[in-house]
Image (cartoon, rainbow, N blue to C red):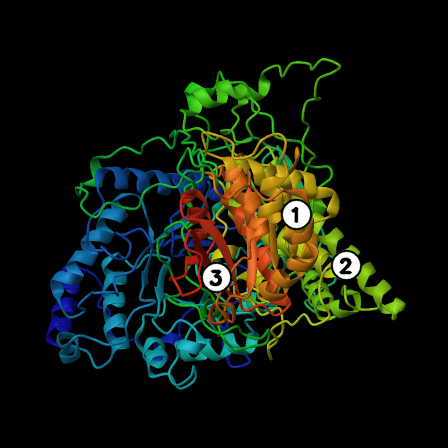
């Protein structure tokens, strides 16, 4: 206790009141509290309610410009508070002792000044709990020095955070403090008084939610110590029953308020997505009754990492708060100066909502969502408005400064566009684009665990993989590119195919300026500036292609988007309907299988009708993606694009699979089943659909990073039909001859390569064929057979005899050309592969994609469709045969998850066998 006593003496010597322990009696005498149901409930007439946003997620912090836009929105919507606590600001948490450098101080002063301009209370939070020694006075002095610096920037409100740290104290602290809670409370009280007892001072306990309390909330020694010893004017942060709480009940708040001796401030992680790289939350604020408002000191939402995706989260929080901010029912009026006025009366009716019956008499999540989306839609038609490039994290080695002499800097900044050009994924002349996943920075959530049921008690972050950093978004065009004419997107709003997944970019690594000048029709373009938008686009001649005109985004599109990326513990109504329909179509596919006599006409008609409706729902997702990709506000698009790209890709793959089920599946198709509901939440909606596909474990095929710049270039994948044979033969011939000096076949035998490599599969195993299409027609194919042994027997009976007639056996005594060697193969007995190999890899596959297709996700989607069809009919593994000299195809298949199988007795000598388990 010696170190603690010295700290108190230092505070008194500075003329500040002694922190002293706080008794229960002292709390009871605190002003402004009345008793209601055994819990302190403040009168709502003149009290301060902390309500706003906390930037407290793990991941890349927001930019200064984004924060300024946040302040503007908060002022417009009536939210008064911003808590600065980004976990990846190194000097907020990891290097908390380090003073801010000149540049960093510049930014913080600007931020604080901007908050004052918009009448937002700026709360600076520091998180020293990772490595602070509470009993070391030098550590306490370092903390005071750091907060002194921030105070000189103009900050008047502070927070001390001890979340997400180890409970154990070091030996030195154990000699001074009786418990971890006593150590935290002691330093918090001292800092609070050192700063002059600011009006707003927040404390985040280590036990900040019900599940973290040992043994429980009511019996937690830690919380009892906080309630008894923490000064009554210090507010306590609380996340609810869990880290991410589905519901926060009045009873739970009354319980914790009684223990900590004050009403808590909710740090609400309801919309936080830093624990899952595939999840985004665009649903409304819900699960918190407005009866909580008079029982709380505030609510701060810790939302999505992607700034622009938080419009709904923050807007609906504001609607929730305003619906009962004074404890009575009122209209919600949100204004933005003289420019716009939004006045919405929150009605009590459900108005046909698909959600559960809403019982809160003051707030309807369904109507609040509709209000938010209606206003958000207006932003999508506005061009890029501010710089959204997120700034680098703090430099731990930056020079410390005396901030008193600094003038607030300008908020203006600029950025440039770096365009990344992709290479063809199957071209020998240029190194293929890597299909391997991009490297990402680690974040919260260390491992993937079991899928939970909808009503499970587990946290949503306990069911997901780590949150991955997305590639840097591109913000605005390079000034040097302003003279370049606007790039017109491909017209894709019409005739969307069943597998609209991918992008095509330029095939040569040129500078952005050269590429765009040479190819003004390229599908990838930098952000269009206002100058570009004002340029005359020109008028096409009568025989020329008309200018592209993007279809505007609709409220229905945004509603669908929100329901696809809804909330942590539930999907939106349309998403749930899609999951249920796909699960039903999958489970009942036997009634439409190719080997079923289809006697049950009613069941067949029902399956086909529901499949058609499901495809319509899939098309609506793809149409939403296309419209959103063409929206004017690219700033919003860049934050949303990785997520809509992902859901569009998986929905397109599922759509293609349903098409295959309806015309090619076998009645013996089997699907993995488990006890869990098919809509458990790991990975969001995309993860749900992945788990319903036969190849659910093939994560590499489902990981399809978006292109570096948004694009509306679309592809479709569909089942093969006999009319496609000519196009497939052409592609097969082109890809086989790629890179060869001499074409191996003559004009007299144009079908030879196709007959040799794919003809048998197309003729005898067409049930496992898929084709890739773009605007110009077929540009790729994926073929296979579920069991190569009976397939080879069929070929000997029904394919080889025709080939022997078509191609005369060449004279073996002379040197044979490549074409003659192919002809000879039809006349010679081909050795089969060993049974020991085929027992594990029974299926033969063949995939080819034209070199003009540059997006790697196309190949992954093609392979995903093919392998799904094979596994659904019982295959354990697939293999392909590649010429030893064909490095291009070996590289291509290896990036699709195939590996070279070690040589076995019976393997062909001049062929490499590559396999993949299913």
Q: Give the distance between the C-alpha atoms of the residues marked 3 and 2, in whole angstroms.
A: 30 Å
Q: Is residue 261 above or below residue 73?
A: below
- Compare marks 1 and 2 and give the one earlier in the sequence: 2
Q: Identify the residue at horizontal 47%, vertical 60% (top origin).
A: 915
Question: What residue sits 55% from the left and 69% below the top?
Answer: 246
Along the line of sight, the residue nearer the viewer: 141 or 838: 838
Separation of residues labelled 1 and 3 (CA atoms): 30 Å
Q: Are marks 1 and 2 in contact (CB under 8 Å)?
A: no
Residue 467 x, y percent position in the rendering: 42, 58
Q: Which residue is mark 2?
A: 611
Which residue is the site of mark 3? 916
User: In the image, is residue 666 above or below residue 744?
Assistant: below
Q: Earlier in the sequence, mark 3 or mark 2?
A: 2
626 versus 256 height, above or below:
above
Disc 3 to disc 2: CB gap under 8 Å: no
The mark closer to the camera, 3 or 2, is 3
The N terminus sits in image quarter = bottom left
Q: Out of 280 and 821, give the one closest to the viewer.
A: 821
Q: Is residue 359 left or right of residue 462?
A: right
The reply, left or right, for residue 472 in relation to residue 766 is left
In the rendered image, which residue does mark 1 sit on? 803
């Amino acid at each position: 206790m010696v170190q603690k006593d010295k700290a108190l003496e230092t505070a008194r010597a500075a003329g500040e009141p002694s922190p002293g322990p706080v008794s229960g009696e002292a709390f009871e005498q605190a002003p402004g509290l009345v008793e209601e149901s055994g819990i302190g409930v403040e009168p709502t007439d003149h009290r301060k309610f902390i309500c706003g946003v906390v930037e407290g997620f793990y991941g890349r912090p927001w930019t200064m410009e984004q924060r300024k836009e946040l302040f503007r929105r908060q002022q417009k919507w009536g939210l008064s508070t911003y808590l600065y606590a980004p976990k990846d600001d190194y000097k907020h948490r990891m290097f908390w002792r380090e003073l801010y450098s000149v540049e960093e101080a510049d930014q913080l002063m600007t931020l604080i000044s901007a908050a004052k301009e918009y009448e937002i209370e700026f709360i600076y939070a520091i998180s020293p709990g990772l490595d602070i020694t509470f009993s070391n006075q030098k550590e306490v002095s370092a903390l005071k020095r750091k907060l002194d610096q921030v105070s000189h920037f103009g900050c008047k409100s502070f927070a001390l955070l001890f979340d997400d740290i180890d409970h154990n104290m070091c030996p030195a602290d154990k000699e001074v403090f009786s418990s971890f809670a006593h150590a935290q409370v002691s330093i918090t009280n001292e800092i609070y008084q050192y700063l002059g007892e600011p009006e707003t001072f927040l404390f985040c306990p280590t036990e900040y939610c019900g599940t973290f309390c040992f043994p429980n909330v009511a019996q937690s020694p830690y919380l009892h110590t906080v309630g008894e010893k923490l000064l009554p004017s210090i507010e306590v942060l609380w996340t609810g029953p869990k880290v991410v709480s589905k519901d926060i009940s009045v009873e739970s708040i009354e319980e914790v308020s009684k223990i900590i001796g004050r009403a808590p401030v909710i740090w609400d992680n309801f919309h936080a997505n830093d624990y899952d790289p595939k999840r985004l939350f665009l649903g409304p604020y819900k699960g918190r009754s407005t009866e909580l408002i008079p029982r709380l000191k505030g609510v701060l939402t810790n939302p999505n990492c992607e700034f622009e995706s938080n419009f709904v989260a923050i807007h609906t929080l504001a609607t929730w708060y305003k619906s009962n901010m004074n404890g009575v029912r009122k209209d919600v009026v949100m204004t933005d100066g003289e420019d716009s006025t939004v006045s919405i009366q929150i009605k009590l009716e459900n108005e046909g909502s698909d959600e559960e019956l809403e019982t809160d008499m003051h707030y309807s999540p369904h109507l609040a969502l509709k209000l938010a989306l209606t206003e958000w839609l207006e932003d999508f038609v506005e061009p890029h408005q501010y710089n959204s490039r997120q700034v680098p994290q703090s430099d731990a080695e930056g020079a410390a400064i005396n901030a008193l002499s600094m003038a607030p800097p300008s908020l203006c900044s600029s950025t440039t566009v770096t365009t990344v050009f992709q290479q063809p994924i199957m071209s020998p002349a240029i190194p293929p684009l890597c299909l391997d996943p991009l490297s990402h920075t680690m974040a919260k959530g260390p491992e993937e665990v079991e899928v939970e049921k909808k009503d499970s008690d587990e946290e949503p972050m306990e069911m997901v993989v780590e949150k991955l950093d997305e590639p840097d978004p591109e913000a605005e065009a390079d000034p040097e590119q302003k003279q370049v004419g606007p790039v017109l997107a491909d017209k894709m709003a019409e005739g969307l195919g069943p597998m609209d997944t991918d992008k095509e970019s330029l095939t040569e690594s040129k500078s952005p300026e050269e590429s765009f000048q040479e190819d003004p029709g390229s599908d990838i373009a930098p952000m269009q500036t206002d100058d570009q938008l004002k340029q005359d686009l020109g008028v096409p001649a009568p025989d020329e292609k008309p200018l592209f005109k993007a279809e505007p985004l609709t409220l229905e599109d945004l509603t669908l988007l929100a329901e696809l990326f809804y909330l942590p513990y539930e999907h939106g109504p349309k998403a749930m309907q899609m999951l249920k329909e796909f699960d039903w179509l999958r489970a009942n596919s036997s009634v439409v299988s190719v080997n079923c006599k289809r006697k049950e006409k009613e069941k067949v008609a029902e399956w086909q009708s529901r499949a058609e409706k499901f495809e319509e729902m899939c098309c609506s997702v793809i149409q939403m993606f296309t419209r959103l990709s063409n929206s004017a506000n690219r700033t919003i698009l860049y934050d949303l694009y990785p997520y809509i790209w992902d859901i569009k890709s998986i929905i397109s793959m599922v759509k293609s699979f349903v098409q295959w089920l309806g015309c090619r599946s076998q009645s013996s198709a089997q699907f993995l089943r488990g006890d869990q509901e098919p809509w458990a939440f790991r990975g969001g909606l995309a993860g749900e659909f992945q788990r319903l596909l036969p190849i659910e474990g093939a994560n590499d095929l489902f990981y399809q990073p978006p292109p570096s710049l948004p694009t509306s270039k679309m592809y479709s994948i569909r089942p093969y039909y006999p009319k496609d044979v000519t196009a497939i033969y052409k592609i097969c011939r082109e890809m086989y001859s790629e890179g060869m000096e001499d074409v191996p076949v003559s004009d007299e035998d144009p079908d030879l390569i196709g007959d040799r490599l794919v003809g048998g599969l197309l003729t005898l195993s067409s049930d496992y064929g898929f084709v890739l299409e773009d605007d110009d027609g077929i540009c790729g194919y994926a073929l296979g057979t579920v069991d190569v042994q009976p397939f080879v027997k069929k070929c000997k009976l029904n394919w080889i005899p025709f080939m022997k007639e078509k191609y005369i056996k060449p004279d073996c005594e002379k040197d044979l050309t490549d074409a003659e060697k192919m002809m000879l193969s039809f006349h010679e007995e081909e050795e089969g592969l060993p049974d020991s190999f085929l027992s594990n890899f029974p299926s033969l596959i063949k995939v080819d994609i034209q070199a003009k297709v540059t997006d790697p996700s196309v190949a992954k989607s093609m392979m995903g469709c093919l392998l799904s069809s094979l596994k659904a009919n019982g295959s354990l593994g697939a293999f392909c045969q590649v010429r030893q000299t064909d490095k291009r195809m070996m590289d291509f298949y290896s990036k699709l998850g195939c590996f070279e199988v070690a040589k076995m007795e019976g393997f062909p000598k001049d062929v490499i066998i590559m396999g993949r388990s299913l």
